[in-house]
Amino acid sequence: MPREDYTAVVLVVDRSGSMSTIAKSVQDTLEEFVQKQIHEPGHITIDTTFFDDKVEHRASFVNPHEQKLDLELRPRGMTALYDAVGLKIDSFGRALGALPEHERPGHVIFVIATDGQENSSTEITIEGLADRIKHQREVYSWDFTFIGANQDAVLTAQQFNIPEHSAITFAATAGGAENVLNSMSQYVAATRSGSFAGYSQEDREAALSEDEGKVISVTSSKGGSGRTSSAVAAATFLASGGNLADMKVIDLDQEEDTVVTDNYERDQAVTEASRSTFSSKDAAERLGLSVNRLTAKAQAGELYFFTVGRARRYPKWQFTSDGVLPELSAIVAAIPTSWEPADAYLFFNSHNPALLAHAKEFSPREWLVSGEAPERVIELLRKAG
């Protein structure tokens, strides 16, 4: 019987000339991937194949605990995608067949990463590649994942007999490459542990981002008075920039500042800021949009969001019963770049003496929902910055 604690990972990575703009990011993130996999339970070996119009099988059955992998890309040439993948399937299958059964891996994960379409293979056709992948998946239970830029990677993968949940499209930028390879690392770790669920919607959104995501991992924390709940952990994350302690309510007329100083109230505020959000799916449904369209609007500055891990969160203060706050794009643009999400939460939900109408003091959110002039809120934000 094969070793169930042993996973063989095969990396087939594009190094064609078009990869030059993201080569450093890809290399650095692949090196991080190797380090992360070293610390996962179980035995692992890694094979690497790099390709342009030529195919270089660089490493075979390397134990990363014992040997450092050469992951330098050195971009050049064109894209012999079919040859690279097909020939590696053939050679790796033969190598496994030569091993005694008890030394064979219980799991094979085959990772294909490219920033473009096939344009120079001479030995393997698309039909031949699709047949090979189907055979290895159905007969030997190999897992294939396809990561592609400048194309619809899901449709391309389907032509190769790779299922939708194992394919992901990324933006051909340093940030997009870093995000997608980090998601691939999580994919491999989940597959190794038996908890595989495919790429999430949050993974897909992050991969299409042109910027490096602000990745926040909230694992544990301790708050005052012995409080150690997950809400306090989230609160600590939101306050980590230290801006919340200096949050000011500014009266444009009086030019006086009221400063929030109570630690317990601060913890409560940031806890509510973490809770009072929508997921991408919920925000999209609320606005009657697809998640992809929601993501595009957020990237264009039409919505305010922050990220926790790879998941985007959309604060509820910007939503109304029938859409979003008036002039939201201008409001988002005016929010100080130094603010943490909790700063924005406090600003929009706290009564402000500068917002007085009909003998009543309003919070910025209440002011906007009631139909008062958005320019007043924008002015407050600019003053705060």
Image (tube, rainbow, N blue to C red):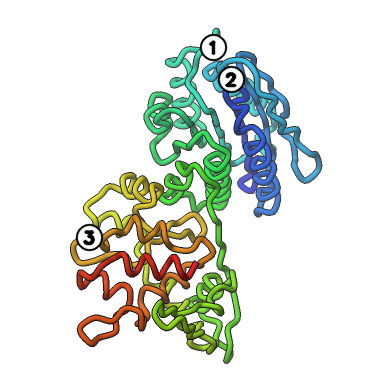
Mark nearer the viewer, 3 or 1: 3
Label 3 Cα crowd, 10 Å radius (few <14 / some 14-19 / many 20+): few
Work out whether residue 253 can be spotted.
yes
Asked whether the residues under the numbered discs 1 and 2 touch, taking CB atoms below 8 Å apart as contact, a structural biologist would say yes
Label 2 Cα crowd, 10 Å radius (few <14 / some 14-19 / many 20+): many
How many circles with numbers are drawn on the protein? 3
- Ranked by sequence position, the earlier of labels 1 and 2 is 2
Work out whether residue 141 can be spotted.
no
- Ranked by sequence position, the earlier of labels 3 and 1 is 1
Task: Indicate the quadrant where residue 165 lies.
Answer: top left
Residue position marked by numbered label 1 in the rendering: 121
Residue position marked by numbered label 3 in the rendering: 323
Q: CA distance from mark 3 to mark 2?
A: 49 Å
From this view, report whether residue 153 is shown above or below residue 51.
Answer: below
**Residue nearest the viewer, comparing 108 with 354:** 354
Residue position marked by numbered label 2 in the rendering: 84
> Callout 1, which amino acid?
Ser
**Residue nearest the viewer, comparing 22 with 199:** 22
**Apparent side of residue 173 relative to residue 63 in the rendered image (left or right):** left
Label 1 Cα crowd, 10 Å radius (few <14 / some 14-19 / many 20+): some
> Callout 3, which amino acid?
Gly
Task: Give coordinates of residue 290: x percent, y percent.
Answer: 28, 47
* Tag 2 secondary structure: helix
Task: Give coordinates of residue 161: x percent, y percent.
Answer: 41, 27
- Ranked by sequence position, the earlier of labels 3 and 2 is 2
